[in-house]
Image: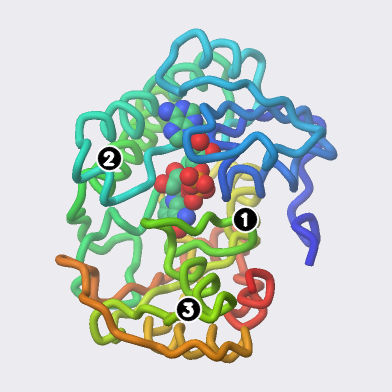
Amino acid sequence: MSVQDDFPSISGNRILITGGAGFIGSTIAEALAPDNDVRVLDDLSSGSRSNVPDDATLIEGDIRDDDALERATAGVDIIFHQAALISVEESVQRPEVTHDINVTATVKLLERAREESARFVFASSAAVYGHPESVPISEDAPTDPTSPYGLSKLAAERYVRLYAELYDLSAVALRYFNVYGPGQMSGDYSAVISVFAEQATNGEPITVEGDGSQTRDFVHVRDIVQANLLAASSDVTGVFNVGTGESVSILELAEIIHDVAGSESEIIHVEGRDGDINRSQADVSRLESTLDFEPSVSLKDGLDTVI
Ligand code: NAD
């Protein structure tokens, strides 16, 4: 499965991808670098230099730094803004830093987009919804984030919307659900699929938090790239969910990964997290009807790309 298959064609543009040395940003860079002049602005705090495709240019710097932003945005046509402090747990420990990186730096970048008249595509998150009243969750559902991370994404996407309204900036926000795929890091706070995959392949116990009945909408990074390219090729504004429209429980996920990996690991239950979201599933009809988005990777096929 190549990341370039069946994507809307974007060529001949000068493109900035913030966070392009990270999991999602580098996958977007891979899809665009062959036919565009792609720059990546990344401080390598969680991303790595080796993720950046050879045909893209890495500017090593912090999105909070005015000089780095100025350099990275000069003459750009499109900005994919992926850089962020992404750990919910860390955001609870460091709300002020979270705000600086996820909100203040986004406003700086919006200012630069305005000066360059660049199309702006922002990586938001389903964390803006908090505990949903019902599923599937549409973009019109109430937003009630439960962490500084979720609140920072909500504030940033409101700025994105306001810049579109006040200054006519061509800007859109994509609310990603649970993204997985090759290249995702597995560490203490990383996404559950990469943790389970590592445990299953190493023969370690697969650790399900709580009873495992909590559900998630796992969307493959290839579909996240598809949504970003569709969003960049149009002039739509507003917010769009990006998920599959389906969900699976964490216990079912553990069982599927166990099977796909042909693992001998046992599945065990460990203490759940306080305040864990019970159910999550995207309503993706807005993205489907407005931008012809179609989730293309089933969970089973997607897991094959990870394990
Ligand atoms: P990632 O950690 O792999 O990528 C983030 C990148 O941003 C890293 O390369 C990191 O070095 C860089 N970065 C962080 N702070 C920076 C700073 N101050 N200046 C410059 N670069 C900085 O994470 P990811 O999963 O690829 O996430 C990309 C985006 O998608 C983030 O905005 C995240 O909030 C959003 N998102 C991800 C998920 C998911 O499930 N992975 C879900 C919803 C939203």
Q: Amino acid at mark 2?
A: Ser
**Furthest residue to the top?**
67
Circle 1 residue: 183
Q: Is mark 3 within 8 Å of ligand 1?
A: no
Q: Using a 10 Å C-alpha cutoff, classify the residue at mark 2 as few (fewer than 14 neighbours), some (14 to 19) or many (20 or more).
A: many
Instruction: Give 270 or 72, whichever is nearer the viewer.
Output: 270
In this view, the mark in front (3 or 2): 3
Q: Are marks 3 and 1 in contact (CB under 8 Å)?
A: no
- Tell which of 110 and 1 is nearer to you: 1
Residue 241, picture quadrant? bottom left
| Residue 74 drawn above or below residue 220 | above
Beta carbon at label 1 within 8 Å of ligand 1: no
Instruction: Please give the residue where the numbered disc 2 appears in the rendered image.
Output: 152
- Give how far apart the Cα atoms at labels 1 and 2 are: 25 Å
Nearest to the eye among marks 3 and 1: give it: 3
Quarter location, residue 110: top left
Horizontal side, residue 79 vs residue 206: left or right? right
Q: Position of residue 88 (x, y in %)?
A: 29, 51
Helix, strand or loop at mark 3: loop
Identified at 63% across, 54% down, the residue is 225
